[in-house]
Amino acid sequence: AADVDRAVAAAHRAFSSGPWGRSSGEERAAVLRRLAAAVTAHTPRLAEIECRDAGKPLREAQWDMEDVAACLEYYAGLAEGLSEEAQAASAAQRVDVGDADYAVRVRYEPCGVVALIVPFNYPLLMAVWKVAPALAAGCTCVLKPSEHTPLSAMELAALAASAEVGLPRGVLNVLPGRGDVAGAALAAHALVAKVGFTGSLPTGRSVMRACAAGVRQVTLELGGKSPALVFDNAGAPALDLESVVEWVMFGCFWTNGQICSATSRLLLQESLAPRFLERLVARTRQIAMGDPLVEGVELGPLVSAAQRDKVRAMIEHAVRVDGATMLCGEAPTPATGYFIPPTVLLAKSPEATIWREEVFGPVLTVLTFREESEAVALANDSEYGLAAAVFTTDPAQMRRVVPALRCGIVWENCSQPCFCQAPWGGHKKSGVGRDLGTFGLHAYLEPKQVCTYLQPSKPLDWYSTAAAPPTHSKL
């Protein structure tokens, strides 16, 4: 708690009396661009740190670093739009109130000190998803990385504080620590104006309670149990089976299966299922599992022994209790590391625990359906609503299915592409609010209405100007 107090106090000083609180949008943009350049210059080292810390294959970690730099550049551009000149000139910020005597506009100002709590699966990228818009908005930050993967966030802070980047002291503070200690104290701190959290549903509930008690803003991204719907289009061009199989694999096994948006519920149309599953199982068995630093490895270890044991227990429960059929997942694992082989399970029922609960590991669960309406109903039958993937060659079917899905992201004939320019977040228990895009920036801004009276020489004439004689009562 003492470390939390010091970090928040440093951020509060930097916002209330330091140069960052008075900086222009252009000045903040310049810092963000220098930080993006520093990340690019240090990508090999940052990617190796991420690979060693999180267990993701090196190629994935390198790709993450490209996305980190791109995210910083994107929010640098949005920061320029927050300059006084840009805000004053923006037609979108002028409000027509239907009264010629008044000019009304909206200006945007930073929230203040923000607490940013991020998970272990994308340690640096998830951090920058929050840090970049917060800094662009003019906020100061206390960033708490996962206790499992703190190293790349600390490297980011060191780069930001370097002479080549020049972020003022106290603007970005990185505070490693356990979620139930440092994270809880941050979410409840009186000087924190806003909390941005990505993580599990139970922890998200705790963060939301703490924010409610302090009446502070919160953005929550709480994961999901996303479906992939694969249709057999009779009368339409046939699906490219190999392409769809690879997208389905990528949607679940990417990042070692530790991804909130994983399309880990596969809904296959019955007429397509036998040949699809044959190719899916064959290709899944070919995934190269091993040391994530070795070139060519496609699936690394999970982040911890506890996570491996949880996933293993869920697989065993699915087979022994819920009657699922293991189509693949018996491959031998390396002697060192917390490995789970890429696993495909054919479920007996949509009530199975493995079908309904987030696994956060390389486990794909399959059900079949007959009709489109059945597929949509099964897809929506979840407490989560983060994402979905739809595979069909029928444009009319795509137009029907996409709006029927209750989720925040839909991928058409693909799975998992993510762009910092587009909003990220979900419906139902997948969270509150959005990261990324302009939505991500506005999550760290307060709108202020500014109303100007244009007729200063014109009296209001609300109160009478004639002096009324005093009324005296005789006692």
Image: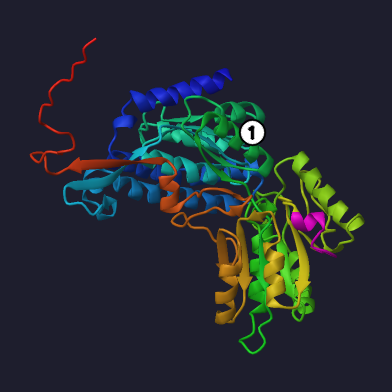
Whether 326 is drawn above or below 147: the answer is below
The quarter of the image holding the N terminus is: top right
- Residue most toward the bottom? 235
Give residue 344's position: percent from left, percent from top.
79, 63
Q: Does the rendering let one see residue 348? A: yes
Choose between 428 and 430: the one closer to the eye. Answer: 428
Give residue 170's position: percent from left, percent from top.
42, 26
Whether 142 is drawn above or below 51: the answer is above
Q: Check disc 1 and report the residue beneath it.
A: 147
Report the residue at 35% width, 46% height from top.
76
- Residue most toward the right? 320
Give residue 210's position: percent from left, percent from top.
59, 31
Q: Does the rendering let one see residue 413? A: no
Q: Is residue 335 left or right of residue 61?
A: right
Snapshot quadrant of residue 401: bottom right
Whether 109 is drawn above or below 236: the answer is above
Snapshot quadrant of residue 252: bottom right
Choose between 59 and 254: the one closer to the eye. Answer: 254
